């Protein structure tokens, strides 16, 4: 389920390759203030010295919590590192000041979900839906409920998408076993919702209901790769490589 549902967090190869030694924070001269540490942050970022940048960012924010620009930088770095605990904690702080910032809301909710903080993730996702009316967000809510093992609420949210959105609404879905160049496929939202239901039913051992939902998805989108592969797995026991 994770592979099908998770909106992957961004990670640059530069950060993955760069593993600088963690350094102690340099002590400022007696006459200097926090601007010394802020300069250290920029210097570290210029050198791609992420650990040193993190140490100085956390030090400055520990002394002066009003520096929102630096907190945004810290959130960005944690996102690039896929540090979900850092993202969740810093994102929650940013949202105290900017509760409707969608660039922070969605990744923070995703991080909380991955950390097992399902209730917090669902609260944020419901808030996002209130701001955007985006049906994709309802599927995110359903996913969080499924992670929480609350299958009834997961099904309720998916059914809501099926009942309330037209066949014209689409979403980009990652295709299985396809090259990077052609990785995504634009699929009608209602077909995706039926496939989500099928996934939940399959995970809970309800094979017949899962196949029924896949048939509904394929009736809407006959070339929906993920649904086709999943149906093949359920019927013939074949697994994706």
Image (cartoon, rainbow, N blue to C red):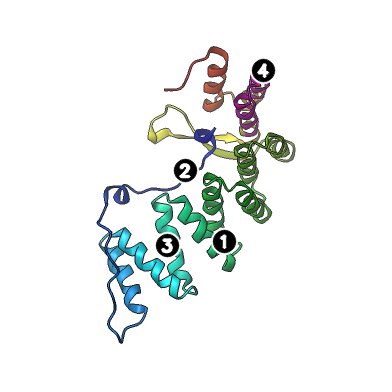
Q: Which mark is residue 101?
A: 1
**Could you tell me residue 89's position as x and y percent?**
51, 58
Image point (55%, 24%), residue name:
223
Q: How far apart are marks 1 and 4 (CA)?
A: 42 Å
Quarter of the image for the C terminus: give it. top left
Q: Distance between the residues labelled 2 and 1?
A: 19 Å
**Badge 1 or badge 4: first in the primary sequence:** 1
**Could you tell me residue 98's position as x and y percent?**
57, 66
Chief SS of the magenta region? helix
Residue numbers of the magenta segment: 193-214
Q: Distance between the residues labelled 1 and 3?
A: 16 Å
**Badge 3 or badge 4: first in the primary sequence:** 3
Q: How far apart are marks 3 and 2 (CA)?
A: 19 Å
Q: Mark 4 points at which residue?
A: 208
Q: Is residue 195 magenta?
A: yes
Q: Mark 1 or 3, which is nearer the eye?
A: 3
Q: Is residue 149 left or right of residue 36?
A: right
Q: Mark 3 or 2, which is nearer the eye?
A: 3
**Badge 1 or badge 3: first in the primary sequence:** 3
Q: In which quarter of the image is residue 240?
A: top left
Q: Name the residue under label 3.
A: 74
């Amino acid at each position: 389920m994770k592979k099908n549902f998770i909106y992957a967090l961004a990670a640059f190869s530069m950060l993955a390759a760069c593993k600088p030694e963690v350094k102690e924070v340099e002590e400022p001269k007696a006459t200097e203030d926090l601007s010394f540490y802020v300069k250290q942050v920029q210097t570290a970022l210029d050198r791609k010295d992420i650990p040193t940048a993190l140490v100085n960012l956390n030090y400055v924010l520990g002394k002066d919590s009003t520096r929102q620009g630096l907190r945004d930088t810290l959130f960005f770095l944690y996102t690039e590192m896929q540090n979900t605990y850092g993202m969740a904690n810093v994102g929650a702080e940013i949202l105290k000041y900017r509760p409707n910032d969608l660039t922070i809301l969605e990744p923070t909710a995703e991080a909380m979900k991955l950390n097992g903080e399902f209730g917090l993730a669902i609260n944020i996702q419901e808030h996002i839906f209130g701001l955007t009316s985006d049906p994709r967000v309802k599927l995110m809510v359903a996913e969080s409920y499924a992670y929480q093992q609350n299958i009834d609420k997961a099904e309720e949210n998916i059914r809501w998408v099926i009942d309330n959105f037209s066949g014209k609404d689409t979403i980009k879905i990652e295709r299985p076993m396809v090259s990077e160049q052609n990785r995504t496929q634009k699929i009608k939202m209602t077909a995706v919702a039926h496939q989500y239901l099928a996934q939940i039913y399959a995970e809970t051992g309800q094979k017949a209901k899962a196949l029924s939902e896949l048939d509904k998805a394929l009736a809407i989108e006959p070339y929906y790769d993920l649904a086709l592969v999943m149906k093949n797995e359920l019927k013939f026991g074949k697994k994706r490589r």
